[in-house]
Amino acid sequence: MTKLTTAFLGVAHIHTPDFVRRLNARSGQITVKYVYDREAERGTKVAGETGAQFVSDVDTILNDPEVTSVIVCSETNFHEDLVIRAAKAGKNLFVEKPLGLGAEDSANIAAAIKEAGVIFQTGFFQRSSPINIFIKKEIEAGNLGKITRVSYSNCHQAALDGWFDTDWRWLADKSLAGGGAMLDLGAHMLDLIIDTIIPSEGEVTSLAAALGNKGGRYGDEIDEYGTALLTFASGATATFDASWIDPKLKSTWEIYGTEGQIQVIGYTQVLYFSKKVEGADGSPITELPASAPHAFELWVEALLGNTLPVPLVTVDQAALGSTLMERIYISAGRTTR
């Protein structure tokens, strides 16, 4: 059996505990040898949870030939330095989203990863959802006709309930995270648009956005909600909303075409109409595709050399998402820098 050895380069991200859980569940396949973090207390805690050694310098990890991969869960503004150094050291990479703060750092990261030829993945787990797999399949099959418009909301109550008050406070610190709700939650929507809509509708030719603050829990420099409007080369449009201050109801996808429509209610119910598909009369779909593994699990499977049910996110796709996100913030009169 193949046995992998990995390490953490930063453990600041809110998804780190989930990755620790997944790694511990695969202890027979993958070992965490080291944990690096700029905050020793935080890094030492995760090292204890994974049976790893905490180290205060990155080179210990990068110079160890036994470590063939690294997991970058640092604050976003440290991604460029850490990821480029790891790529040059030949380490396969899982990099938490977003890849970077904007076009420049993301382009530098992408270039280093492609030059190194290492395996790359990022944390866009929504591609693995049965609903999103279904939507992508129906669009690719042409069953909606010509796409005219798309809308999507990705919202929760983080800034109402204080999710970032303690361990994850950096996510609401503009100097470390680059942005707030739009960058955090909107990144997932941009990824789905890049993966699902851009292949048929072409590049984003124009965009506009508005970002705001109402709760005030984390000051007024970090956005708590916002809306973006994208126009594609085909003339199709997409709007999406992101929010940290929605108290209860959850996300909705809507895709409209000249011959079909898909509406997602909450996270579970899918209404589907298509002139091209027998039985697609607007009623709820009762059978969806099987769920694919989480994005992190897909990366481990790729390291093991196994066949994947859905592709990994390419570094060019991840860089495009960060580039478009920077444009969204600039359009709204803000910046991710």
Image: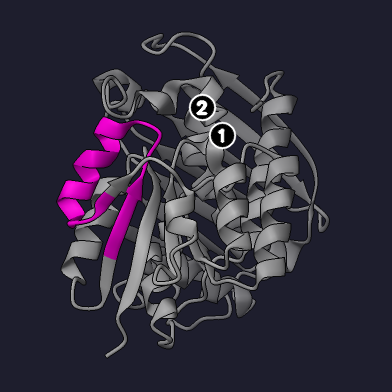
| Quadrant of residue 318 within the rendered picture | bottom right
Residue 38 falls within the magenta-colored stretch:
yes
Q: Is residue 126 above or below residue 180?
A: below
Dot 2 falls on a residue whose secondary structure is helix
Residue at horizontal 26 percent and vertical 22 percent from the top: 166
Q: Is residue 6 above or below residue 333?
A: below
Dot 1 falls on a residue whose secondary structure is helix
**How many C-alpha atoms fall within 10 Å of the one at disc 1: few (<14), some, or many (≥20)?**
some
Q: Are marks 2 and 1 in contact (CB under 8 Å)?
A: yes
Q: Which residue is mark 1?
A: 77
Tell me if I can see residue 151 in this picture.
no
Tell me if I can see residue 214 in this picture.
yes
Residue 120 falls within the magenta-colored stretch:
no
Left or right side of 116 for 186 = left
Which quarter of the rendered picture does the N terminus lie within? bottom left
Residue range highlighted in magenta: 32-53
Left or right side of 82 for 58 = left
Residue at horizontal 57 percent and vertical 52 percent from the top: 83
Please name the amino acid that badge 1 sits on: Asn
Which quarter of the rendered picture does the C terminus lie within? top right
| Quadrant of residue 274 within the rendered picture | bottom right
Q: Which residue is mark 2?
A: 176
Residue at horizontal 69 percent and vertical 42 percent from the top: 105
Compare residues 314 and 24 and report the one nearer the observer. Answer: 24
Compare residues 142 and 207 and report the one nearer the observer. Answer: 207
Please name the amino acid that badge 2 sits on: Leu
Q: Position of residue 211 (x, y in %)?
A: 59, 21
Disc 2 from disc 1: Cα separation: 5 Å
Residue at horizontal 47 percent and vertical 77 percent from the top: 310
Compare marks 2 and 1 and give the one earlier in the sequence.
1
